Image (cartoon, helix red, strand yellow):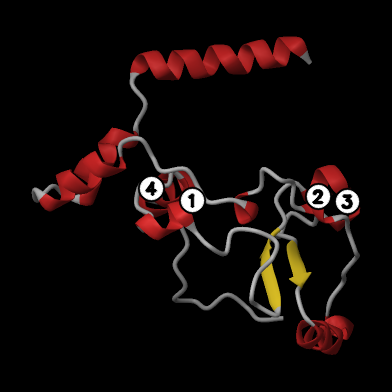
């Protein structure tokens, strides 16, 4: 198991401007919104990704350090996976449970509605932090979001 290098970049999400922009889909390449590889039939031998929601499906596999999902697509991929099996803890899973049809790895991401404006601001000379302000929801949107959370909690 490798250790984190001392010079590795570490930042909490709330202070990591790039991560916020990346996860909001505002700074992605145009090809990400029409990706030919965002499905289960891929030309690769193996696909490796994050298993978000593992705690809901296999709680015993959730160690709070991150659980990966591995999809084997070919005989060569199966051979490679079998070579590594002794070095990992793994379990087989139903694809639709471990990667629901709504998972980002199964469909292209939606373009951020203000992506074009974001890049226009950058092209006009705005700094990334200045351009990032368009990601911040206004007061009304924050209120609506909080009301939705409260309603959801009441329904549970």
Residue 21: mark: 4
The local crowd at label 2, few if under 14, some if 14 to 19, many if 20 or more residues have their Cα within 10 Å, is few
The CA span between labels 4 and 2 is 28 Å
Tags 1 and 3 in contact by the CB under 8 Å rule? no
CA gap, disc 1 to disc 3?
27 Å
Q: Residue furthest left?
A: 124
Residue 86: x percent and y percent?
89, 84
Q: Give the mark toward the camera: 1 or 4.
A: 4
Q: Residue 39: x percent and y percent? A: 64, 58
Q: Is residue 76 above or below residue 141?
A: below
Query: What count of labels does the image hold?
Result: 4
Sequence order check: which comes first, mark 4 or mark 2? 4
- Please tell me which residue lies in front, 36 or 91: 36
Label 3: element kind: loop
Quadrant in which the C terminus appears: top right
Residue 12's tag is: 1
Identify the mark at residue 96; answer none if there is no mark. 2
Say few, some or many: other residues with alpha carbon within 10 Å of mark 1 (under 14 / 14 to 19 / 20 or more). few
Q: Residue at x 72, y 10 (%)?
A: 154
Using the numbered discs, state the Cα–Cα distance from disc 1 to disc 2 in whole angstroms: 31 Å
* Residue 5 as seen in the image, left or right of residue 81: left
């Amino acid at each position: 198991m490798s250790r984190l290098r001392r010079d590795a970049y570490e930042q909490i999400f709330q202070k990591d401007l790039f991560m916020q922009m990346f996860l909001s889909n505002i700074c992605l390449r145009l090809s990400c919104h029409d990706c030919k590889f965002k499905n289960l039939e891929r030309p690769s031998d193996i696909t490796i990704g994050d298993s978000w929601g593992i705690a809901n499906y296999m709680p015993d596999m959730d160690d709070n350090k991150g659980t990966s999902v591995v999809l084997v697509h070919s005989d060569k991929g199966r051979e490679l996976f079998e070579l590594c099996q002794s070095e990992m803890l793994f379990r087989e899973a139903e694809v639709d449970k471990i990667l629901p049809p709504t998972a980002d790895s199964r469909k292209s991401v939606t373009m951020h509605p203000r992506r074009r404006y974001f890049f226009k601001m950058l092209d006009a000379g705005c700094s990334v932090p200045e351009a990032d302000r368009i990601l911040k929801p206004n007061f009304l949107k924050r209120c609506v979001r909080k009301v939705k959370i409260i309603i959801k909690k009441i329904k549970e």
